[in-house]
Amino acid sequence: MGVGRLAEAEDQETRYRDAVGRYGAAIERLARACEADPDERRDLVQDIHVALWRSFAGFDGRCAIGTWTWRVAHNAAASHVGRRRRRPAQRLATLEELETTAGGADPEAAAGESQVLDRLNGLIQALGPPDRQVMLLYLEDLPAAEIAEITGLTPGAVAVKIHRLKALLAHRFHQGGPE
């Protein structure tokens, strides 16, 4: 391997490690929102990591590493969801499989919070891929401008979509279903 190619490989590895260090937990949350089955979720996380590592070979710096990471992760997740929809339906995650968010709190309160998060996660999973992508990025506290850059929408369209999705999710949550 020549010196130039070796430096490129090191840059690729450095960018990948930086991205995983900064966005690894968010990638896990994205996978959890897209895939209820734990085995399929692990496969999705692995697919995202492979796609991300490969993508940094062509990273040219025209956007922030965070934007690049989100775009690659969401594209990999969208591909996964598309493949999954062509297969038979899979089972949903059980309450025990969901991570407990209230560490050390009252078990009943923790179970109630897990049920609420499970319902919300199910409602988000029921959204179409473009809407799910916008909502997940919003839940990661990304600004509308960055969401727009990742999704190809305008910042104004992102803001309107977020407003409408929040209202839709709130309505569906209070109605008890995906109507």
Image: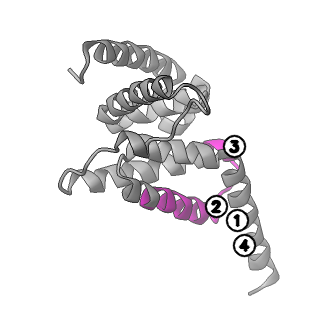
What's the amino acid at mark 2? Phe
Find the distance from the CA under tag 2 to the CA under tag 4.
Answer: 9 Å
What's the amino acid at mark 1? Gln
Label 1 or label 3, whichever comes before in sequence order:
1
Q: Which residue is mark 3?
A: 64
Q: Is residue 143 visible?
A: yes
Query: Element type at marker 1?
Result: helix
Query: Element type at marker 4?
Result: helix
Q: Is residue 68 visible?
A: no
Find the distance from the CA under tag 4 to the CA under tag 1.
Answer: 5 Å
Find the distance from the CA under tag 3 to the CA under tag 2.
Answer: 12 Å
Q: Which residue is mark 1?
A: 12
Label 4 or label 3, whichever comes before in sequence order:
4
* Residue 9: assigned label: 4
Callout 3: few (<14), some (14-19), or many (20+) C-alpha neighbours within 10 Å? Answer: few
Q: Which residue is mark 2?
A: 56
Query: Mark 1 and 3 residues: CB-CB less than 8 Å, in contact?
Result: no
Label 1 or label 2, whichever comes before in sequence order:
1
Whole-percent x and y of residue 175?
Answer: 25, 13
Which residue appears farthest toward the left when viewing the image? Answer: 88
